[in-house]
Amino acid sequence: MKQVLSTFILLLLISTSSFGQWENSSFTFQSKTRNYRTYKPAGYNPANPTALIVILHGLGGSMNDAEGLNITAIADTANIILLSPQALDYNNTLMPVEAAWNSGIQINVSGFGNFIVNGDVDDIGFINAMMDSTLAKFSVNPARVFVCGASMGGFMTQRLACETPARFKAVASVMGTYAKALPVCNPGKILPMAHFHGTSDELIGYDGNLTFNTLVFPVVLSVDSLVKKWIAINNCSSTAQHDIWPDANSDNLFVEHFTYSDAGGKSKVELFKVNSGLHQWYDYANTSGEIDYSVEIWKFFNKQYNYDPTDVGDRHLAISKFAIFPNPSTDKIFIKSDEPFVHAIVTDICGRTVLSKPIIDSGLSIVSLNKGTYLIKLITAKGAFNFSKFVKL
């Protein structure tokens, strides 16, 4: 049945007759030019809010890498905007590396001390600013925002999940676990997590050892430790549903799929243990149709949304019915909702906060703003919040 379903999904993706397009963008963040790419799916319609997936490349990678993951076909079919940001180079004289996220990895080199890779770069702030800019430009359903990453992008995904959990409905890491130098992860909410890892990964071992330039550093969590932590975070049973997928081409590479569910039987943590798997993003082409990470990631993400579209632990969609008028406006906007909003935070298309003030008598003055498009975050007295866009004329 699993193979039939996978084949159906693959045929559905291949049969898509129209395609979206990538667009390169950049902005200045903390005195540095930061670059990213946006994929707008085929048939994008502002009246039909999309999902959003942030995709983080690995060490030495590029924002262009997302194009090679077969995920654009899924985006066209499922109406998903993709965001692929570019990491900055780490220009340390001892161990310079290209395109490294500040994922919290700290390496101790004998005789030289500790090195935190790009420790002075605020990648969390950059990624959040990029997301805010995208939310201001496109019609996105805030209950369908996700992040995934490979290798160092997987480590960065885990850091984002732990430090900015309110931004995401679910996360998925591939080959990258969690840096031991970071604080203990405590997102304070249910945040579903899927992880993909090969048991023979030669760079980021299943046991948590990181190999760099033939040197081995025990600086990240093992896969088992990572999964155990997320089981606790998501209040799941420690007993998994365990499925072994067939090794169809007899190459000794096969998947063990572990599903950990909450008290309601809903999957919140999943592990895809790829026996004999290396440090590689696997897809149908290089596994003879046995597994495609992009497909499984989207199935996991979409599953979380479909469990209950309005059930998000931080109540950020608790106010689903509201209206902003007039929009566009020149001087003031009014907000009508079932439960009154008491505060508003307005950001521009670069993600900068330009206004943060109480809402008085359901109104907000925007006289001080320049002409343009803005994203507004509306917050109730109970902490529920939601987003919308408006235009200042």
Image (cartoon, rainbow, N blue to C red):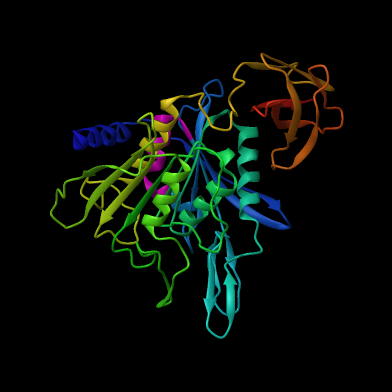
Depth check, front residue: 222 or 92: 222
Residue drawn 29% across the image and 31% down it: 12
Above or below — where is 17 with respect to 210? above
Depth check, front residue: 53 or 27: 53
Residue 284 in sight: no
Above or below — where is 182 with respect to 304? below
The magenta span reads 67-80
Residue 99 in sight: yes
Q: Provide residue 374's location: percent of width, then percent of height.
A: 72, 32
Residue drawn 38% across the image and 37% down it: 300
Q: Provide residue 361's location: percent of width, then percent of height.
A: 82, 16
Residue drawn 59% across the image and 23% down it: 318
Q: Provide residue 312's location: percent of width, then percent of height.
A: 53, 30
Tell me the quadrant of the picture where the C terminus can be found: top right
Please check the rendered image and state whether residue 365 is part of the magenta-colored stretch, yes or no: no
Tell me the quadrant of the picture where the N terminus can be found: top left
Residue drawn 34% across the image and 55% down it: 197
**In the image, 185: left or right of 204?**
right
